[in-house]
Amino acid sequence: MRAGQMKAALVLGIAVSLAGLAVPTRAADTRPLVVARNMDLTSLDPARSFCDTCQIYLSAVYQTLVTLAADNRTLAPNLATSWEVSPDQTRFVFKLAPNAVFSDGAPVTSADVAWSLTRLKNMKSDASFLMEALTAVETPDDKTVVLRTAQPNSEFLNMLASSYAGIINRKVAEANGAVGGENASTADQADNWFFANSAGSGPYKLALYRNGDQLRLVSNDKFWGTAPKVAEIIIKQVPDAVAQLQMLQTGGADVAMQIDPDTAASIKDQNLVLDTVPSYNFIYLALGVGSKANTVPLTKPIREAIAAAIDYQGLIDFTVGGKGRPQPVAIPNGFPGTTDLPLPKQDLALAKAKLAEAGQPNGFTMKSAYPAVNSYGVDLSLMMQKLQQDLGRVGIKLELEPITFAVWRERVAKDGIPITASYYAPDYFGTVQYVQFFSMMSTSSWVKRSHADKVQGVVNEKEGELLKQALAATPTEAERIYREIALEMIGDKVIIPVVSPDLILASRKGVTGVRYSACCNLALSQVGRQ
Amino acid sequence: MLKVALQRLAMMPFLLLGIVTVAFFLSQFTKGDPLVALIGERQMNNPAVVAAAKERWGLDRPLAERYVVYVRNLLHGDMGTSFRTRQPVATDLAQRLPATLELVVASVLLGGSVGVILGILAAKFRNRPGDTAIRIFALVGSSVPMFWLGLIALFIFFATLGWSPGPGRLDTRSLPPPFVTGFFTIDAALAGQGRTLREALAHLVLPALMLGWTVVGIVARLVRASMIEVLSQDYILVARAKGAGEGRVLMTHALRNALMPTLTILGFTFAYLITGAVLTETIFSWPGIGSYAVEAARQLDYPAIIAVTIIGGAAFLLTNLVTDIAYALVDPRLRDRR
């Protein structure tokens, strides 16, 4: 496609930021800043990582083409200073910052971008789905990258803002065993190298990683943007929320993001700042409509009865001490398509009426196996006990069975579970990931896990058709269509979100810039001290 | 004596192979999705991703082939790559095992010596207030759960009084000493890093005391019971009749005989704590092998599970050997037996 043929549909951040032209400067604060955290790291290689702590690390060390602004909605320039999208949403042209360099001083080129994104796709790892739509990459010159997708993809830019799409110094990585070609998933041998080294252009670089102990970052003195505020950051492995709090109180840590509401309620310390913010994480119930263990068919009236019997506010009070929000659909509150959706509410009369309509006026028994974990401050065992009480009020008896996550996954995939629970956190700011995972369109993950494809009348292809329309639409139009999809998903009554737990950002007084980000969890480069 | 020790050593490779074989096959038949640590929820239904993961991690090979490959690699010191940490298991263990050993050695030394002293005193002052106090102290150590003891200790000595440093092996902002043994106390001393040595010792005290308390609980009660039995023997009466002082009677005539069962228990406690100190490690953020094992088990990290089982098994075998040698040293009858 010639440039003249392309209409710029979306142009953001045309001007190179002044920060980008700044002479590299060193961080002013040399005292290490400590983040106490139960780390869930799977890898330090952007193409293989997939976890909350991974997002924090990657966004500090590797830069993406675009990033999510502080409002958690708008895309902002990062390595790319400007970009253009074709009207059919299949061609994306990026201009790279002329002065962007990696931590070894080598310039960031279009070849590095092409290699990094292709490698992410070819790695066939957890985050590879982000680049599934990518069909071709062109590099007309050192500072221009053209990405193409076969189908329109209005959310592709958001996927590029995911921290897993960080750009790697190709030369350095390849010299240490990294492979970007189609055989990357088996031929790549750089995983171990990435545990001791980094090759990014971000404000920090890796200094030390000791599994189960600490992750240590030092400021990148070749960083081409505004220098981070703190010269050294340590993410310290502290599995226990109480120990995290004690470390904050004694000055052993400066920031902690995993303190649960009960622990937070016990804090009476003038030296600590606790900021409770809504999160994009949520806990949900899932109904195995095609599960072999169902004692009665989970028809629409039965599913509606279950949804109506739940005391949503009571669950929030019981599990997170009121520090959470109800969520209408399996798309986080605040994501495209969630504006003004009807909130779920308990209606026991409706639940009983629906059970009678389904021919089960006296209720029935359901087996409920669930992973025995505490996720985002919610103890699933406690939550399921409360659910057992709620459903018991309309005659539905739950037989609870806490199991390990590994067993849960096997059971969900094999025979299904009549009613279960799990959790989800965003991989980037965008709605498509939720539609692909939670909707009842035939290709979604939960259609297979709920075994909905084995019973009639649950698969909802309208959601898939709407998704196609949304991907080809302008952002405003897409938002309207996503809302339509959300209403369909609410109507499915297969995935029932019960709580979006708030996040407690705890820090010592004087620590600044601690904020929750939908792409990066915690933007370390913005954290500093007064 | 030497012959027995050599015979035991010669048997160890075969015993270890047995442990490896049992651990390998048991772990393969555990319920659960083996890909849980390798593929997240989102991609678990993606056939291309599942196939790629199986190929990369060798899970597409027949079980017998995987066993042969594993044993062959093991002979070269390669324990595979952890599904969870994605690092060579040998590297993980090199980081984790010394941390646990440092804690367990300190705990067993502390708990063992205090336990023996308290056991002797309890036996000496049998059924008197001192004995009762010691028995209560021992009972608390062996019966109160570690997760409670540890949290309370941290709350009192770290968070409230500030007498103890916080969780971890060093202050959060300090760098570990250069790796030689993996024991921070020894490595810091070898590197001449006085400040790091003080920090490492200070961080070791509270978890070692708490873990050691459980050892005290076991040892003190055992020594007390053994001493009471030994002190009622005729040869003790003879020793006293011959004019031996009470100290000599207790330490030379009685303790030596009373120590036999204690040595056995101490040996097994040491071996058990190598993989069993998980609660202490979790509460004190001590990056040891216990927490590594628990995480491995939760996520079906086969290579790590098998490696930890081998380490645990080897620890028991070695402890058995050392205990037998210690028996011989304590008991002349065994030493002279041919």
Image (cartoon, coloured by chain):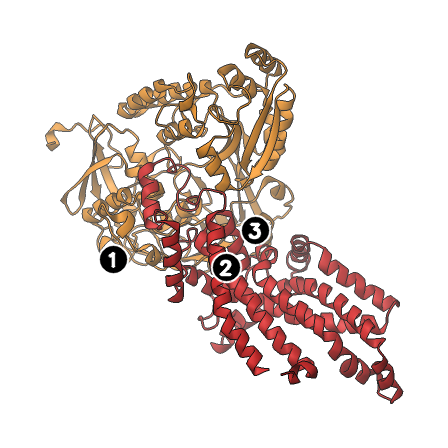
**Amino acid on which disc 2 is placed:** Val
Side of A246 relative to A452 (left or right): right
Residue carrying label 3? A244
> What letter labels the chain drawn in orange?
A
Judge depth for marks 3 and 2 and give the one in front: 2
In the displayed structure, A108 sits above or below A68; it is below
Whether labels 1 and 2 share one chain: no
In the displayed structure, A507 sits above or below B313; it is above
Mark sitting on residue B308: 2
Categorize mark 1 by other alpha carbons within 10 Å: few (<14), some (14-19), many (20+).
some
In the displayed structure, A364 sits above or below A412; it is above
In the displayed structure, B81 sits above or below A266; it is below
> What letter labels the chain drawn in red?
B
Quarter of the rendering occupied by the N terminus of chain A: top left
Mark sitting on residue B241: none
Residue carrying label 1? A172
Q: Mark 2 lies on which chain?
A: B
**Amino acid on which disc 1 is placed:** Val
Instruction: Tell me, yes or no, whether the two marked residues, 1 and 3, touch with CB atoms within 8 Å.
Output: no
Residue drawn where x is 80% and y is 66% of the image = B134
Q: Does residue A15 appear anywhere in the picture? A: no
Q: Where is residue A141 in the image (x, y as percent from the top left)?
A: 13, 45
Instruction: Tell me, yes or no, whether the two marked residues, 3 and 2, touch with CB atoms within 8 Å.
Output: no
